[in-house]
Amino acid sequence: MKFLFDSKEFEEQYHYDGKDLGAVYEKDQTTFKVWAPTAKAVQLCTYPDGSNGTCLQEYSMEKQEQGVWCACVDGDLEGTYYTYRIDIDGTIRETQDIYGKACGVNGNRSMVVDLEKTNPDGWDGDSFDRQGQTAPAIYELHIKDFSSDPCSGITKEHRGKYLAFTEAGTTLNGEGEFATCLSYIKDLGISHIHLLPTFDFASVDESKPLENQFNWGYDPENYNVPEGGYATDASDGHVRIKEFKQMVQAIHNAGMGVVMDVVYNHTYEGDSAFQRTVPGYYYRFWEDGTWSDGSACGNDTASERYMFRKFMIESVCYWAEEYHIDGFRFDLMGLHDVTTMNEIRKALDSLPGGRDILVYGEPWSGDRTAMRSDCVPALKKNVDKLNERIAIFNDDTRDAIKGSVFKEKEAGYINGDNELGAQIPSCVLAWCDGLGGYMPKCPGQTITYVSAHDNFTLWDKLNYTLFEKPDFYKKEEEVLKLNRMAAGMVMTSLGIPFFQAGEEFGRTKNGDENSFKTESAINQLDWTRAAEYRDLIEYYKGLLTIRKHFRALTTKEREIIERFSFLDTNLQETVAFRIQGIEAEGDWWKELFVVYHNTDKKEELELPEGSWNLLCDGKNCVPEGLEACGNTIILNEKSVMILGRK
């Protein structure tokens, strides 16, 4: 089938341009359409329940042009569950609708839904000032991690749920002193909350809400439906939709955008709704018929094929329009082709406010993939072929600053590998100098970071590089120094800063580098720890404020790199540079002078000519200025020093 599906003849005969696949609901009639060009017959089956009960009625679907099958059913079907029974060469497979917008528990049956009924009060007026985010900063968060801690101040029935985001004014243990959850994140100063996968995924049994289940969610089941495990009732297909919207609305009301982590590169298993609908079409296979597994999850989807590319584009736009999503992070984006990613960007740009919707992804794959040979993969080396408003996670910056994510003891620049000092100027310039062997079109194409959900937390990684037998729960001053230094380097570099939730209070997973299904007790945000590390939190807040009020650091245009000049300090492995401001409205400083000092001793450094004010000494960060400086400054050990000139 690989040769048939990749043929020009098949694409010309069966590509379908209509945007009406799935169940199109009207009060007096619902129209069902499914693309199944290889099917001999398709039956629509309706059910009264999302997981139990026998079929109410079967309807024979009529074959139309371009491989589409259609059935129109009279009456008000809102809330009716349905599946398709698809006959492929005498083998009948029953499946949910890949274009389904609602489903029952565990997603095995789709549901007809009147989406208007799922809108919370005020949804029509829900908005977020995307264009006004001149200093974007992304906070990566898992929905369950956010509020599972009993000390979070969230009511018990909402812990680990969408509705935890709707609780305002929460504090540690409800004592009214230390802000937690959404109030805390709002005060931190970030612009976007990046949510780990929130579409319906298969690795958590939604029918057992009382069991302590956990998964990151990179196991897609129904792409256009919210995950039911985060809803207060997964059995009613309406609830998860409304509560997801309430979460988005609450985040928007707090002045932040919502980024969805999307996983179109593979499905939970090969026997998916896609495979049961058109066997072999939506996936990549090798010449011998074996499954391509560049995702390291058992299968790779085929973004280069017309109907899956169409699915991806329409799915992303659906989330943006129906759920008011402000950004998309693509898991293993290197498994998708450049054309598909650019078409997604183009489609989002056509939506109201769509040009300011963030798009970024991982420019790598898990392994090699059977992508069609005439396609270009969206890998780091091909970043120049992506639209300039598609950004990539920069693993070179990540590893240069604090060491390889794959080798726990391997150090980076801040923790002892001085040879990596030569790469630091490239990190600062978001690798727009081309010295990495690839060429971003502009700094806005780079996500600058040192920690994410994958691999060790920053705190755990630093502990591993410093101690033979680390105690991850001990408040070590040496680790704090390096944590602050890593943050200072990220925040004074070009690109879009991104950090894992809790990095700013020394988040630990007790050394677990792959906690994708580890219990919540390890994964959840520890709000008591946050209160104990509030000095580190204040440091992050100060850095974010400096970025916000010095637009040269946040400007996405390539020309900004000309305003950076690196100086010879005569100090071994110390990196120092000046940044000329752009005189933007709201800027507090005309110029910054930044020094990265990675040694264990204090050193004296002569300052450039001018009147400088110390903003950050490596331990304290006060954006308005700590103190005026003379002609020299003492560099603290293991520090990022930031000075401003008015």
Image (cartoon, helix red, strand yellow):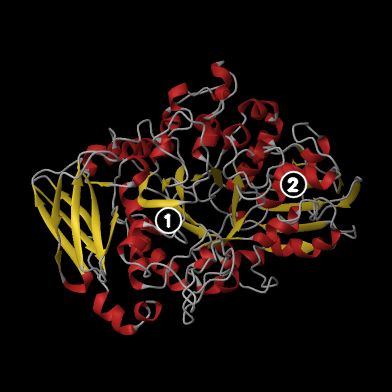
SS category of the residue bearing label 1:
helix
Does 153 sit above or below residue 12? above
SS category of the residue bearing label 2:
helix
State the image coordinates of residue 235 (x, y, percent, origin top left): 32, 35
- Total numbered labels: 2
Residue at point 85%, 53% (across, down): 416
Neighbourhood count class around disc 2 (C-alpha, 10 Å): few under 14, some 14–19, many 20 upward: many
Write down the residue under mark 2.
461
State the image coordinates of residue 150 (x, y, percent, origin top left): 55, 23
Residue 393: image tag: none
Q: Nearer the viewer, residue 100 or 137?
A: 100
Does 509 sit above or below residue 578? above
Q: Are marks 2 and 1 in contact (CB under 8 Å)?
A: no
Type of the residue with mark 1: Asp
Write down the residue under mark 1.
356
Q: Nearer the viewer, residue 448 or 479?
A: 479
Residue at point 11%, 44% (across, down): 27
